Image: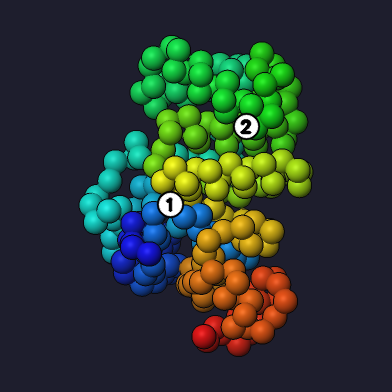
């Protein structure tokens, strides 16, 4: 598969100490890639670097061999940023406007489709402050998709999501992949990792393995990705 997002020799530190050193990886178009690693391993940092919310001290991130505009990206942050005093529908409208979607009927149609997807159609007129944590999480995901981005960056989107809804999210992600959308998703949950086309295991800002879930299990001679991860942490990854 051809490279689409290309990250080369990326170096980044929050303070003086280097946190991400010489990070190199390519992501093919129309795939779902999982950034998997323990808390503090750098998943959110990498998402923020791709988004341009953080600037690397060295290295480059290219999409299709070019610098890119942030209009091409959709982002669901780990901590949702919603307008609590507005309704669900108003939140979708505001974020549509912020993303330069100004056609009223288009906003209406997209909002309805997304509310359907996240199973919140019956809460469209509810104030966000009255929603449960999982509902806010789902609304935050819909907002990430409001501008029909070519690349979707989802930081722990399945936290607080029940298994049935998780399945429906994943079938939607696969449909997005078929429509040439590329998805980068972080998670602690190995069920999510299993659904990804490829998984990048991180520890302390470094890649310890990048492969398909099936290969990661096969070459570690384990039965599941959780065990594969533990083995790779202890013994490294060799094909
Ligand atoms: N604004 C900041 N200033 C200084 N250090 C930071 C900042 N944000 C994150 N860090 C540090 O960078 C490291 C990576 O953090 P990051 O949030 O990327 O991890 P993560 O893998 O997303 O963790 P989690 O799974 O808990 O969300 C951690 O050691 C963290 O303490
Ligand atoms: Mg994080």
Q: Tell me if I can see residue 16 in this picture.
A: no
Q: Residues within 10 Å of mark 2 (few under 14, many from 20)?
A: some
Residue at position x 64%, y 62% in the image: 194
Say which of 110 and 142 sits in front. 110
Say which of 71 and 27 sits in front. 27
Q: Secondary structure at mark 1?
A: loop
Say which of 178 and 195 sits in front. 178
224, above or below 81, in the image: below
> Mark 2 = which residue?
117
> Mark 1 = which residue?
30
Residue at position x 50%, y 43% in the image: 176
Residue 98 locus on image (x, y percent): 41, 24
Say which of 133 and 213 sits in front. 213
Residue 196 locus on image (x, y percent): 56, 59
Mark drawn on residue 207:
none
In terms of image quadrants, where is residue 60?
A: bottom left
Q: Secondary structure at mark 2?
A: helix
Residue at position x 27%, y 53% in the image: 64
137, above or below 26, in the image: above
Residue 217 locus on image (x, y percent): 64, 76
Residue 33 locus on image (x, y percent): 50, 58
145, above or below 16, in the image: above
Q: Is residue 233 left or right of residue 3?
A: right
Q: Is residue 173 left or right of residue 132?
A: left
In terms of image quadrants, where is residue 149?
A: top left
Q: Tell me if I can see residue 66 in this picture.
A: yes
Q: Residues within 10 Å of mark 1 (few under 14, many from 20)?
A: many
Can you say which quadrant of the picture contains the N terminus? bottom left
User: Mark 1 and mark 2: span between their CA atoms?
Assistant: 20 Å
């Amino acid at each position: 598969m051809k490279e689409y997002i290309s990250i080369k020799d990326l170096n980044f530190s929050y303070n003086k100490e280097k946190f991400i050193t010489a990070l190199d990886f390519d992501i093919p178009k129309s795939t779902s890639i999982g950034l998997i690693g323990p808390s503090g391993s750098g998943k959110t940092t990498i998402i923020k670097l791709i988004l341009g919310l953080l600037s690397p001290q060295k290295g480059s991130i290219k999409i299709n061999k070019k610098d890119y505009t942030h209009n091409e990206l959709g982002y669901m942050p780990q901590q949702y940023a919603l307008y609590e005093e507005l309704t669900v529908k108003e939140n979708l409208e505001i974020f549509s406007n912020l993303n330069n979607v100004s056609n009223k009927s288009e906003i209406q149609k997209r909002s309805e489709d997304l509310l359907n997807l996240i199973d919140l159609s019956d809460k469209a007129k509810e104030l966000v402050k009255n929603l449960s944590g999982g509902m806010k999480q789902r609304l935050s995901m819909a907002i990430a998709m409001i501008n029909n981005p070519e690349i979707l960056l989802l930081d722990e989107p399945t936290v607080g999501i029940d298994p049935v809804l998780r399945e429906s999210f994943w079938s939607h992600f696969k449909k997005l992949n078929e429509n040439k959308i590329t998805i980068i998703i972080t998670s602690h949950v190995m069920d999510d990792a299993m659904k990804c086309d490829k998984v990048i295991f991180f520890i302390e800002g470094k890649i310890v393995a990048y492969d398909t879930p099936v290969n990661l299990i096969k070459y570690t001679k384990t039965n599941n990705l959780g065990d594969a991860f533990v083995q790779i942490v202890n013994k490294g990854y060799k094909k």
